[in-house]
Amino acid sequence: MHKNNLQNNSELVLKIKQWGEELGFQQIGISDTDLKSAEQHLHNWVNKGFHGSMDYMQKHGLKRSRPDLLLEGTVSIISVRMDYLPETAEQMTQVLDNPISAFISRYALGRDYHKIMRNRLQKLADKIDAEIGSFGYRAFVDSAPVLEKAIAEKAGLGWIGKHSNVINRKVGSWFFLGEIYTDIALPADQPASSHCGECKACLDICPTQAIIAPYQVDARLCISYLTIELYGSIPEHLRSSIGNRIYGCDDCQLICPWNRFARLSTEKDYTPRHNLNNSQLTELFKWTEQEFLKKMEGSAIRRIGYDRWLRNIAVALGNSRSSEQTIHALMRQKQHPSEMVREHVNWALDQLDSNKYHNQV
């Protein structure tokens, strides 16, 4: 455990929170490392197979729920919140309601948040180092076996809602989380209490009914999992429910009453790039692999790769309106080298009344 020269570590916490806000974080909280209840919840979730093909959710053993096993000497965790909402709920709904438009989860429209937040967390750690001298720490942004939502709840940033996202009473849930594990013993903040009440709007709105019960999400049904985490073929019986969502899904956040308090982000890096917040499916489907790699440089979307990008758009095109433009777009990829892409293109053509266009292609 680090021994610093401040008589009262509460003073250091106040400085950490001030520095964090200066660096662009909207909220900073402190938690201890006792995550026993979250550990049990994770254990039950994995045992039910709800993690699907996300093997990393279990391969780290107890490191995810016992911070000291991940970084020896950890006694406190600095948890941070950064808001990212790039546009209003009305603008998002307009895209979702237009079957020829491509809907991308709003967290992924701008620059990759991992890099942005990790850089800020490092700057925060540097400020602490300058204040108290060298100390043990490690910064995380969704990059290691860390129970970031449980930590954020313990640190008072918000509560874990029935959809499994963290909700803050004042700003809703459109925010990223990051952590600094540290060997400095810091006074913990008061944990957040739940304010979901009887509301089950998120359960009712989920297109694939992936929220099978309050606080229980079966990832295998979740559109975010199907379009981002899943490597192979999307189960056929779930494709029509995906609609025009080609990367992630925000429905459970859009419907949440607490998000009426959400504020638009002032972070320029989260501004939508390449008109991704309002693009037509056929336009994105025309991108070559080189265009995809170039335009998605510095984006979280790039990690799914070109083939899964096409797979997702093909499903959305199959759920859109049948038109000469749509059929032509799909027919151009009918001979794609990837068997996975071809399968989803053929499925999409089957969903549309494509016969009358075939002779024209």
Image (tube, rainbow, N blue to C red):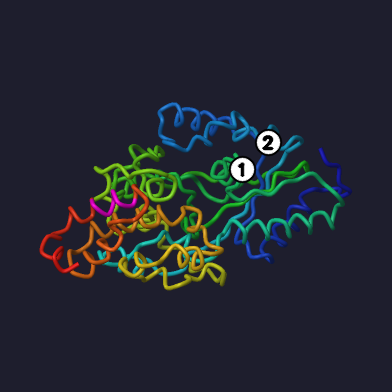
Q: Position of residue 257 (x, y in %)?
A: 37, 56
Bounds of the magenta span?
341-346
Secondary structure character of the magenta stretch overall: helix
Q: Is residue 218 above or below residue 202?
A: above
- How many numbered marks are there? 2
Q: Looking at the image, which is closer to me, 296 or 141?
A: 296
Image quarter in which the N terminus is found: top right
Amino acid at pointer 2: Leu
Picture residue at 68% right of the left edge, 36% below the top: 70
Q: Residue 81 placed where, x, y %?
A: 58, 56
Task: Give coordinates of residue 85: x percent, y percent.
Answer: 47, 64
Position of 245 relative to 213 (above/below): below
Q: Is residue 44 magenta?
A: no
Where 214 sits versus 350, above or below?
above
* Disc marking residue 70: 2
Q: Position of residue 334 (x, y in %)?
A: 27, 57
- Residue, x 38% and y 38% (percent of image)? 218
Mark 2 Cα-neighbour bin, 10 Å: few <14, some 14–19, many ≥20: some
Dot 1: element: loop
Quadrant where the C terminus lies? bottom left
Q: Residue at x 64, y 48 (%)?
A: 140
Question: Which image quarter: residue 28?
Answer: bottom right
Q: Are marks 1 and 2 in contact (CB under 8 Å)?
A: yes
Residue tagged 1: 144
Q: Does the magenta stretch include residue 342?
A: yes
